[in-house]
Image (cartoon, grey):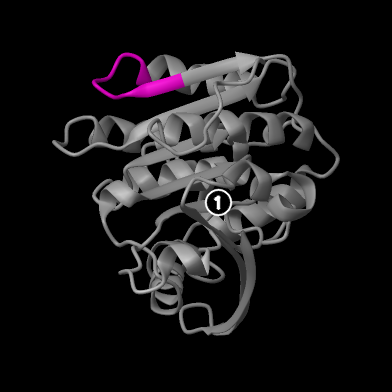
Amino acid sequence: MILNEVNFFSEVLGVRSTMYVLLPQRMLAETKGKRKPKYRTLYLLHGHSDDHTAWMRWSAIEKHAEGLNLAVVMPAANLSFYTDMVHGKNYLQFISEEVPAVVRDVFPLSEKREDNFVAGLSMGGYGAFKLALTYPDRYAAAASLSGAVDIRQVTKAHGDPMDAIWLAEMRAIFGDLSKVPNSKHDLFTLVKKVSKLPVKPRLYQCCGTEDFLYADNVRFRDVVRKLPLDLTYEEGPGEHAWAYWDKMIQNVLKWMLPNGKNLKGLIGI
């Protein structure tokens, strides 16, 4: 595959931004004189302490995506929870509007809903579900790996010495934290709204049983299972760590592209 580092000025954020874009490498002998198709696209989101390099540095995403005719877009979103911040930048607009516009202008990526997917880990798992549930007409499917799916719990104090700093960061993003439940930031609220729509994204959720976010994921799973939504849920031994995410992203690709080329069966967990 071809690894591209895209440096561009973000009009939404007002700063220089960077993302990685993985593209399948076409063989010249196979494409000469032929119409070049547009690629399906996976927007792959990082966690709260990472950036656009995380998936390339700590997982084998390039190897896993090889042969799938799939582009993988990995943008940097800082500690934003992929949200239009109350005191900060508009990262939801950046991820949902500007990033797709930029990559589609530069690379041959499909704009069709059925060809667009979003996935992420931890904060990125929250972001993936938030994007797909906020804009269900844009994404065919969304996957959360060890996602911070219960933002009501994420924005609470937990008796940690760093709580004051964490809560200040959460207020910068979401504003009055008492208003987060049942708001546009609450995945429990969003998933109930989307379940009533005619067009709904498929959802994939996984979490390790030793992960500190495991209880939150079980709670979200139990709510979604009561709704008319297509949810695939997996759990098994694993911590909040790259060893687990690199293993599970392979299952995400298998689930996301059931008719994908050169896909192996689901790995064991």
In the rendered image, the quadrant that contains the N terminus is: bottom right
| 119 up-or-down from 49: above or below | above
- Is residue 263 highlighted in magenta? no
Residue 186 shown left or right of residue 88 in the figure: left
> Is residue 96 visible in the rendered structure shown here?
yes
Tell me which secondary structure the magenta stretch mostly adopts: loop
Residue 110 place in picture, x, y as percent: 33, 61
Q: Is residue 265 above or below residue 110?
A: above
Residue type highlighted by circle 1? Leu
Q: Position of residue 52 (x, y in %)?
A: 67, 61
Task: Give the magenta range.
Answer: 224-232
Given residues 254 and 197, the one toward you in this image is 254
Q: Residue 71: image x %, image y %?
A: 49, 57
x and y percentages locating residue 54 in the rendered image:
73, 54
Q: Residue furthest front?
A: 29
Q: Quadrant of residue 87?
A: bottom right
- Say whether residue 146 is visible: no
Q: Residue at x 40, y 62 (%)?
A: 96
Which residue is at a point 50% across and 48% down the rendered structure image?
127
Classify the position of the C terminus by image quarter: top right
Label 1: few (<14), some (14–19) or many (≥20) C-alpha neighbours in 10 Å: many
Please report the residue visible at 31 percent of the width from the left and 43 percent of the height from the top: 140
Does residue 226 show up magenta in the picture?
Answer: yes
Q: Residue at x 67, y 45 (%)?
A: 63
Secondary structure category for the residue under label 1: strand
Q: On the image, numbered disc 1 is attached to which residue? A: 44
Q: Residue furthest right?
A: 161
**Image mark count:** 1
> Camera-side residue: 160 or 76?
76
Left or right relative to 45: residue 11: left
